[in-house]
Amino acid sequence: MAKPSVLVTRRWPAAVEQKLAADYDVAFNRSDRPLSAGDFREAIQRYDAVLPTVTDQIGPEALEVERPQTKILANYGVGYRHIDVDVAKSCGIAVTNTPDVLSECTADLAMTLLLMVARRASEGEREMRAGQWLGWRPTHLLGTKVSGKTLGIVGFGRIGQEMARRAHFGFGMQIVVYSRSPVPSDVLRQFGATQVPTLDALLPQCDFISLHCPGGAQNAKMIGARQLDLMKPDAYLINTARGEVVDEHALAQALMFDLIGGAALDVFEREPAVHPMLAQCDNLVMLPHMGSATREARQAMGLRVLDNLNDFFQGKTPRDRVA
Ligand code: DGY
């Protein structure tokens, strides 16, 4: 029997590419640049499976073709709101993602950002590299103590819980949670956490706020000027979730006028573009969407895509089917 044909839209870790190529007839996008809507339209008519990732926008213009060949979009990544899942479903195309395997690494990076912004690590590093260090002095680059402070976690899925674990057990932080769905009390108890009913209730009581909710229309600009104003004037915002959750213009203004203590971002509204005002803010740490960027997580994500493909082509329901 012919092997199913598969398109991989970006370069993957070599070991997983090899494993995939052993069982499937694979086409790789060796340019490692995002494909256009036209490329996707063609791909949907040509390949049995397309394996996209967060940089691939797959909407009706790509999916609504006369004779789709694609039966599954097996996304490399946990977030899948770059795919129009309702249209995919109506076209009879299954969609899967890769949960679990990147939660720890993404939470590690969120904690890294929290520590970097609290302790002004980027400012210190910039000063060192510019050869501007004048030596130790009692009032130089003073940051904020992290241990024992209150961390607000917005979105309490796997990554949010891993963040709570690090902050509570590693740094003795008090955890306050806002999530649209109720969190079971035994889960909250694990981290000594309390859940508040609204975002407005969370914002004024936290020293740090870390976002771990999905992106998409429902959460777009969830943190805007009004919400930033509700934060303590010395509180910090951390975003490793999705860029669209934060109104970048409002954040840049809050940072420039010192309305909050600082922010640390791994994700941006229009990646890879960055709002021009953000780059001018000293009290901001920025990383290029690196949450899951470890060899271990990126390999595990590829293997999870492969598991989903194998499930699907063996006639089973893929383990991570989202549509
Ligand atoms: C995801 O998995 O959704 C990340 O943002 C990319 O690793």
Image (tube, helix red, strand yellow):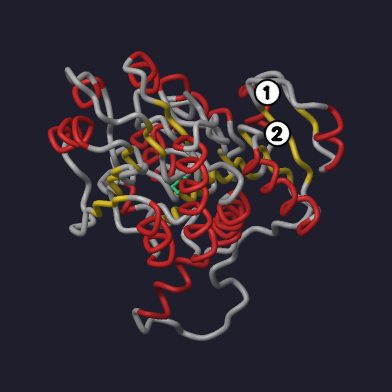
Is any atom of residue 163 visible in this view? yes
Is any atom of residue 52 visible in this view? no
- Left-right relation of 252 to 113: left
- Left-right relation of 177 to 70: right
- Left-right relation of 177 to 126: right
Q: Are marks 1 and 2 in contact (CB under 8 Å)?
A: yes
* Viewer-closest of 110 and 130: 110
Determine crowd level at label 1: few under 14, some 14-19, many 20+ residues with C-alpha closer than 10 A. Answer: some
Q: Quadrant of ligand 1?
A: top left
Q: Percent position (x, y) of residue 43?
A: 20, 36
Determine crowd level at label 2: few under 14, some 14-19, many 20+ residues with C-alpha closer than 10 A. Answer: some
Label 1 lies in ligand 1 vicinity (Cβ under 8 Å): no
Residue found 76% across the figure and 57% down from its top: 171
Residue found 43% across the figure and 33% down from its top: 80
Amino acid on which the number 1 mark rests in the picture: Ala
Secondary structure of the residue carrying tag 2 is: helix
Mark on residue 205? 2
Residue under circle 1? 201
* Viewer-closest of 278 and 317: 317
- Left-right relation of 82 to 154: left
